[in-house]
Amino acid sequence: MGVKPLDLEAEDLEMGSTPTPQEDLELDDVESDSTMIPTTLSPDTQHAANDSVAVGSAQPLSLPSPSLSPVTAALTHGGSYFSAMDTDEISSPLELPPSEEDAVDESNQLTLSPQRHIMQLQTPREQCTPGLMEIPKMLDSFDAMPSAVKTYVMYQLLRRCSKSTLQTVAEVVNPALKCDFLTLLPPELSLNIIKYLDIKSLCNAAQVSRRWRIIIDSDEWTWKKLFDNDGYVLENGELDRAIREGWGFQDPQGDDDCERDINAGTRSNYCAPTLTTPPPHGRQKKKFNTRANSKKQQKKREAVETLGKEEFNEVISEIYSNSVGPVAAANAAERAGSRALVGLQSLRNLHLFKSIYRRHHIIRRSWIRPQVKPRHISFRGHQRHVVTCLQFDTDKILTGSDDTNINVYDTNTGALRNKLEGHEGGVWALQYEGNTLVSGSTDRTVRIWNIAAGECTQIFHGHTSTVRCLQILMPTKIGVKPDGKDLIMPKVPLIITGSRDSTLRVWKLPMRGDRPYLPGTSRDANDNDLFLNPNNNPYFIRTLSGHQHSVRAISAHGDTLVSGSYDYSVKVWKISTGETVHTLRGHVQKVYSVVLDHKRNRCISGSMDNLVKVWSLETGSVIYTLEGHTQLVGLLDLSHDRLVSAAADSTLRIWDPETGNCKHTLSAHTGAITCFQHDGHKVISGSDRTLKMWNVQTGEFIRDLLTDLSGVWQVKFNERICVAAVQRDQVTYIEVIYSSFSSLSLFCV
């Protein structure tokens, strides 16, 4: 009796080896319309197949070999095949263990088609295509298969599908394979992952889904870390203002839509504390409006009135003292008022430091974009006199002049707040820290001022010629002691002054509440003589002697002081003892500028011999001599891992402080460079007729900030404001230039 024809593909009856996936791909290269050569079974072959089936039914069940397809296995072993396989662990459908049925003589194999290498079984055509009614049965059989066999079957099915069918399958399979890992992971693990992303990756990830945006925006620690790493600095009162005005709930639509006070309409008589005003203490009584026409308005008022509670003020005070992290600031912002009705509702979650980061990024970008035009105000100052020194912040501008006065201006309006009078000669150096100002003059004195009161509180005598340079040195961590405690130097804030009398003097910086030191404050009859004797000054510490000519420039950090002199030398001092550590000789002309590179334990000097020299503070030897300038190198600045030098040859050069290589030469001025400053993104320099801005990373010229000038005396800038003292038509002006994003109202805290 012959074998009953089966509704099988000839490939499923092949008794030889099953093609590998690579071989299957090769089979697909053959044209689908290839002529198929039918193969018939001889009587002997049919008889052998019958014997094989009879013997197989009497033998115990075993796993098929890779050459045996699942359909053939079902025919050979019956319905118990798949259930028996459920108990076996199979790592791959192509690695099934061999069975005794695999030992079939090659004479029993079917004949291969010469074009597709596929065996064909001559069966009635009507039995070759299963009907739709058989699909449920096929699915039930598929469900009963082990996972390894399912993988094999799916592979065989997919390799037979057209591209359009595969596209449909992909549309179903791909979404099922995606995994929202940030949502599935515990929050602490999700935050630990995103802290490694850079700013661009964070912004892209925040656009993946609403959940990802909430996770990323609310990670205040990561945004604060990026804020610090990118060199941004919080301005005085900025964090307070961000909390009070609800910046953390805003998503601006443009560059000018980031600093709205969204809580202005909900604040009643309460005024949040600022850095300059101590926060109120004690509980405030709630005031209820009896005419409230809705419970919603009453709840809103109560929420605002709770801001006056003592516990909130304590949190704010800690934020001002920088004793807490960004999470505490975010918590304070959460309690500071109602959520903003700005943008989409799904984007109104708190993101305090992301908002602050974005604000600073917009400001920085507006400086270096050539198409953005900065705004500025201009006002007259010091009549026709030269402005010799300048310092400012977002609240005030201080200028010293050879007219003997120090003027204090309002940064926002340019109004003259105060005029500090007392010096009897031109003011050549000044610096302030907080409300304390230190100035040096050609009258050979150092004066200490209370800026807010406009009063001189101390006068230091001792120098016998012009005080040419000075620096306020605040205590700084410079290392760790053997017991693990921080090594802080100096122990107290100091003032270091350099003079044309060839000496340097070290003074203690008077603090708030310290007693005045002025003529007439002593009880001794010989008051004036005692006052003029520096040894009687309680703030005087020591004199540093050793230079043979004027001290032109100084730079200090920690316990190290570097001074440059007209005697062609640079000296390194130990401030705490006053001893000379090194005398650096190598310049052949006057030294006009020095900077201290404490990060690399080096110092750098610029001289009238056209050279810039880099010295080792450890050995006192020259590491590099930077050549390129053709005239006096009068100015040096080291910041953001870039050394910039300015010379009388009308050029500036940007150097790598690590290697000494010149990275860029800035050539566009027509006269000697009189002033400049740089940060990690831009250089602003002044010369005879213009104030120019450059890209510090590429050396490219960006724009002229000011033109048609007869002189540029001083220039200073911070992240958002640039202040320059210039001369136009023989009259001195103070120019305040704001980044495009800025407005005068931005500084009103």
Image: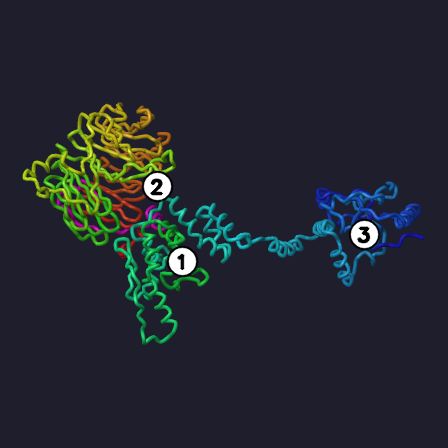
Q: Nearer the viewer, residue 229 or 663?
A: 229
Vertical comparison of 656 with 83: above or below: above
Mark 1 = which residue?
Answer: 251
Which label sits in the foreground, 3 or 2? 3
The kind of residue on which mark 1 rests is Asp
Q: In the image, is 674 to the left or to the right of 204?
A: left
How many other residues sit within 10 Å of disc 3, few (<14), some (14-19) or many (≥20)? some
Which stretch did the figure color magenta?
A: 362-390
Residues at marks 2 and 1, CA–CA distance in whole angstroms: 27 Å
Q: Position of residue 23 (x, y in %)?
A: 73, 42
Q: Please report contact status of discs 2 and 1: CB closer than 8 Å, yes or no.
A: no
Q: Nearer the viewer, residue 226 or 135?
A: 226
Disc on the earlier residue, 3 or 2:
3
Residue 680: mark: 2
Residues at marks 1 and 3, CA–CA distance in whole angstroms: 63 Å
Q: Nearer the viewer, residue 54 or 652?
A: 54
Q: Position of residue 21 (x, y in %)?
A: 71, 44
Q: Position of residue 36 (x, y in %)?
A: 80, 48
Q: Secondary structure at mark 1?
A: loop
Q: Is residue 720 magenta?
A: no
The kind of residue on which mark 2 rests is Gly
Q: Secondary structure at mark 3?
A: helix
Mark 3 = which residue?
Answer: 81
The quarter of the picture where the C terminus appears is bottom left
The picture quadrant where one finds residue 683 is top left
The picture quadrant where one finds residue 218 is bottom left
Disc on the earlier residue, 2 or 1:
1
The kind of residue on which mark 3 rests is Tyr
